[in-house]
Amino acid sequence: MSDYDYDLFVIGAGSGGVRAARLTALGGKRVAIAEEFRVGGTCVIRGCVPKKFMVMASEVSHALEIAEGYGWSFDNAKFDWPTFLEAKDVEIARLSGIYAANLGKAGVELVHGRAILKDAHTVEIVGKNRTITAQKILIATGGRPWKPEDLPGIEHAITSEEAFHLPELPKRILIAGGGYIAVEFAGIFAGLGVETTLIYRGPNILRGFDDDVRAHLAGEIEKRGIKVILGCQHKSIEKTATGLVNHLENGMTLETDVVMFATGRIPHVKDLGLEAAGVELNDEGAVKVDPYSKTTAENIWAIGDVTDRMNLTPVAIREAVAFHQTVYRDNPQHFDYEAVATAVFSQPPVGVVGLTEAEARRSCSKGVDVYVTRFRPMKYAFTGSDERVLMKLVVDADSQRVVGVHIVGPDSPEMIQLAAIAVKAGLTKAQWDATCAVHPTMAEELVTLKEKQTPANMAAG
C-alpha cells in the first residue's frame, strides 16, 4: 500500500482533467479530483456548450428572414431572454451532473474546493482544513479571460463569462477583440437584435487564420449588421446616467449599454502554489511541459489550456488520454498537433484545418497551388441576400497533398470535420477530385474545384 492518500490527484475538473481521472480510476488506481467551481470546466459551464446554445438561439432571426423568402410569414415573432437563460442553465446543470456522476461511477473522489500545491506531493483544499497527499499530480486548471486592468473604467466591462448571465439583454453592446470569442459573441448579440459594434486593434479579425478567411468573414459579418472598427482600441470607459461611453484611441466616442472584453485568455496559474512544488512556467506564463505533458517536477503533469499549447477542448481530452497511456499503461504517447480542425461559430461560421496559404508558401519548397471559390448558397436563392460562401484548398505543388482547407459559410464546422480526415490522411488533390460529388450541396464544391488561382482570376474574382 502506498504511503500517499491517492495514486493520482487531479486539480481541475474540466474535460481534460475528468477524462484523465476517469481513465486512471477505471484502471484500478486511487484517484481524486478537485474543482473550485462546477464540474465540467470552461467548455461545459462557461464556454463552448452555453455559447453554442446562444449561437443557435441567435441564428433563428436569420432563419426567419430566409423563411419569408420561401413564403412563410411570422406574426409577432419575438425572443425572450429570461426564458432562454432558464433553459440554458437547466441544460448546463444537467450536463455538469452527468460529468460528476461519471466520475463517481469510475471510483473517483470529487473534492469540492480550490486545491493549491504545498509541495510536489501535497495539496491543500482552501477553507476546508484538509490536506491531501498523492504519488502523482495532474494540473488541469484551464484558462481565464484576460482584460486590461490598467484601462480607465475597465471595472465597468464584462468578459465572456459574465455574458452568459446578463440579467437582461442590452440594446447596445461593444465587443473588444478580434478572435474566436469576440466574433462569436458579436454574431450572437447581433442575431438577438442588439446593436453590436466590434472593435479590434489589429488590421483584421481572426489573427492567425488564412488571410482570405479573415477578409471574407469581416465583410460577411458586416452584412449581418455588425459594425466593425479595426486598427483601434479603447482609451477609456466612462459610466454615465444613460450608459457606458467608450472613448477610443482614434478620437471616436460610442455609447453602449454593455462593454465586453474578449481580448484573450490566460492560463489559470495564479496562487496555485506551483513554485512550492517545483513547477516552472514558460515565458508566456503557461505551465512548462515536455511533449508528454510532464512538468519540471518529477511527479507532476499538466494538460489543457493551462499549458497554452493548443487551447481546444478535444485537444485537452486527447492530451489526457496520452497522459494516461504514458504514465499508467507503459505506452508513451504524445498528441500530434498537426492538422487539427477547428471551427469558429461566427455568423456565418468558419471551419479550417491544416495550413494557411501563407504558412504553406513558407513550408512547401516548390510552392503551392491554391483553389478558391466564392458563391451564393442555394438556401439564399429566394431572399435577395448577397451573402457568399468561401471555400479554399491549399495544395503542396510538389506532392499535390491538400495541406489546408478553409471554409466560411453555413455548415462549415460540420464539413471541416470530415475534410480533416482527408487532410490528416495526406490525400492528394487528385484523390479529392476522384471523389464523386453529392448534389446539390455546398460541400460538393470541395471535390469539384478545378481552376488554380492565378493573378488574373484573383483580380477578376
Image (spheres, rainbow, N blue to C red):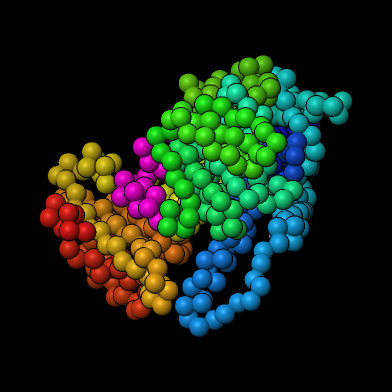
Q: Nearer the viewer, residue 383 or 91?
A: 383
Q: Residue furthest left?
A: 456
Report the residue at 14% width, 44% height from top: 366
Residue bounds of the magenta highlight? 201-220
Q: Position of residue 434 (x, y in %)?
A: 24, 71
Q: Nearer the viewer, residue 400 or 148?
A: 148
Q: Is residue 410 above or below residue 186?
A: below
Dividing the picture into quadrants, the one containing residue 115 is top right
Q: Residue furthest bottom?
A: 71
Q: Say if the magenta span includes residue 207.
A: yes
The quadrant of the rendering that contains the N terminus is top right
Q: Position of residue 249 (x, y in %)?
A: 46, 28
Is residue 401 visible to us here?
A: no
Q: Say if the magenta span includes residue 219.
A: yes
Dividing the picture into quadrants, the one containing residue 453 is bottom left
Q: Is residue 315 left or right of residue 13?
A: left
Report the residue at 53% width, 30% height from top: 247
Is residue 163 visible to us here?
A: yes
Report the residue at 37% width, 45% height from top: 209
Q: Is residue 107 above or below residue 240?
A: below
Q: Position of residue 15 (x, y in %)?
A: 63, 46
Q: Is residue 386 left or right of residue 27?
A: left
Report the residue at 76% width, 31% height from top: 114
Q: Is residue 236 left or right of residue 165?
A: left
Figure label count: 0
Q: Position of residue 202 (x, y in %)?
A: 40, 35
The quadrant of the rendering that contains the C terminus is bottom left
Q: Is residue 124 left or right of residue 229?
A: right
Q: Is residue 372 above or below residue 356?
A: below
